[in-house]
Amino acid sequence: MTPPDVTLRLRLLFGDRLVFGPGKAELLARIAETGSIAAAGRAMGMSYRRAWTLVEEMNAAFRAPLVTSARGGAGGGGASLTEAGDEVLAAYRAVLAATETAAAPGVQRIAALLADMSGGK
């Protein structure tokens, strides 16, 4: 396990087609939690347009869409992860957990060599 004050950010680059990392993973997770692309984006401090753009990018990059949505109206709208979306998010989280475990010894070695940063520098 990495020290508690260390953050490991993992981005997966698939050629020039897709970058999948913590931001898109968080967006998927928040869509699953809120049932809304707009609410998920707001919770992350991003515009509705930016959230939609990221969803469209992810949906276009995978064989099956990761997010499905319905327009608002009398019955209300909403969004949810598809089976593929659930699978991609779970797989990303598993890769991240395995990476954190594998990286822990090296991160601890690096952390031990850092200068004392408690003085506010």
Image: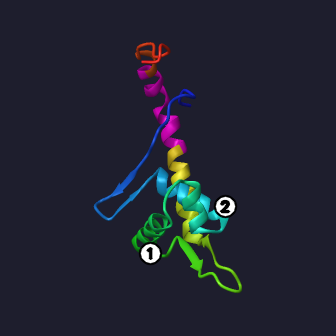
The amino acid type, in three-letter code, at marker 1 is Arg
- Say which residue appears at 52% left-offset and 54% top-offset: 45
Give the label, 2 or 1, closer to the camera: 2
Front in this rendered view, residue 108 or 37 = 37
Relative placement, left or right, of 76 versus 19 is right
Instruction: Examine the residues drawn in magenta and state their main secondary structure.
Output: helix
Q: Position of residue 84 (x, y in %)?
A: 55, 70
- In depth, the one of 107 and 80 nearer the eye is 80
Question: Residue 69, image x and y in percent?
Answer: 58, 77
Q: Is residue 39 magenta?
A: no
The residue beneath circle 2 is 33
In the rendered image, is residue 78 in sight? yes
Task: Give the amino acid at mark 2.
Answer: Glu
Which residue occupies the foreground of this view, 30 or 66?
A: 30
Check disc 2: other Cα within 10 Å, few if <14, some if 14-19, many if 20+: few
Q: Find residue 96 and name its label.
A: none
Q: CA–CA distance between discs 2 and 1?
A: 23 Å
Query: Residue 63 bears which disc, if any?
Result: 1
- The crowding category of the residue bearing disc 1, from other C-alpha atoms within 10 Å (few below 14, some 14 to 19, many at least 20), is few
Above or below 16: residue 103: above
Q: Residue furthest right?
A: 75
Q: Is residue 108 magenta?
A: yes
Q: Could you say which quadrant of the image residue 27 lies in?
A: bottom right
Local SS, label 2: helix
Q: Which residues are magenta?
A: 97-110
Quadrant of the image for the N terminus? top right
Residue at 54% x, 28% y: name it: 5
Of callouts 2 and 1, the N-terminal one? 2
Residue 28 seen in the current view: no
Give residue 40's position: percent from left, percent from top.
58, 61
Answer left or right for 96 relative to 113. right
Could you tell me residue 19's position as x and y percent? 37, 58
